[in-house]
Image: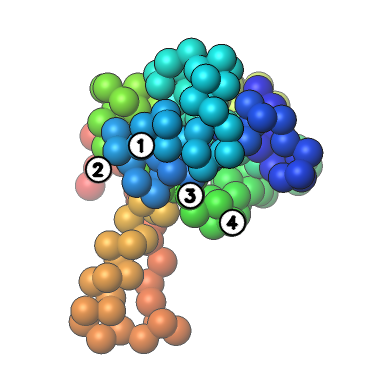
Amino acid sequence: MSSPSLTPPGDLTARARIRNEAFSLYAIQGEERVSMRAVAAAAGVTIGLVQHHFGTKEGLRRSVDEYVVEHFVEALAGVEHTGTAAEVVAARDGAVRTMLQENPLVVRYLLRMLLEPETRGAFVLGQLVDLTVQEIRRLREAGFASTTTPEPVQVVRTILGQIGEHALEPMVGAVWKRVGGSDADRPRTEITVVQPDAEG
């Protein structure tokens, strides 16, 4: 997959430009409301060129899914495995949080896709799970993650911790504003995943 962030807009290929425009439109309007013709118009190309590069709308969406996942890959690739276990994990989580803060359309796209995890969001969720499993296994092997906590629990904690907080932020903000809270005192959203036998 190509880099989502290192190529200047003027250097994008026609294929990348089409994919990027589809990503923006899907994130803002919803993939089901955006036609391939609309994507072509936004990218300044013919619909025939869109079909040439991606075949069908499903092929175009798959490319957008891969582009979104690559944002996570790039964020994690920039983190060094130095320091204590807690510092390494915090650095990796922080890199993803920063990436999401800097790319609000990634958050919007994920929210739309993950509302239907068994259908439209199945591929992108699967890619994120696979990436998270790979990262957790690397951390466990390097001694930076617990080997006593079940791997599936670590995967759920990681994904919810990185994405779930951003997903809930709009609602938290709306509730906070409704009750008259000040921006300076607004609480930070945190999600905790607890194993059944660890409750109480």
- Provide the residue designation for mark 4: 102
| Residue 92 horizontal side relative to residue 37, left or right | right
Task: Return the residue nearer the eye: 44 or 149.
Answer: 44
Q: CA distance from mark 1 to mark 2?
A: 45 Å
Residue at 58% of width from left, 39% of height from top?
A: 44
Q: Pinpoint residue 155: horizontal percent, then vertical percent.
A: 44, 30
Question: In the picture, residue 151 is in which quadrant?
Answer: top left
Q: Position of residue 170 (x, y in %)?
A: 33, 62
Check disc 3 and report the residue beneath it: 105
Q: Residues within 10 Å of mark 2 (few under 14, many from 20)?
A: few
Question: Regarding mark 3 in the picture, which secondary structure is present there?
Answer: helix
Mark closer to the chain start, 1 or 2: 1
Disc assigned to residue 199: 2
Q: Quadrant of the N terminus?
A: top right
Colouring rule applied to residues: rainbow
- Sequence-wise first label, 1 or 4: 1
Amino acid type of the residue tagged 4 in the rendering: Glu
In the rendered image, which residue does mark 1 sit on?
34
* Disc 4 to disc 3: CB gap under 8 Å: no
List x then y, in percent, for residue 23: 49, 38
Question: Relative to residue 124, is residue 190 depicted above or below?
Answer: below
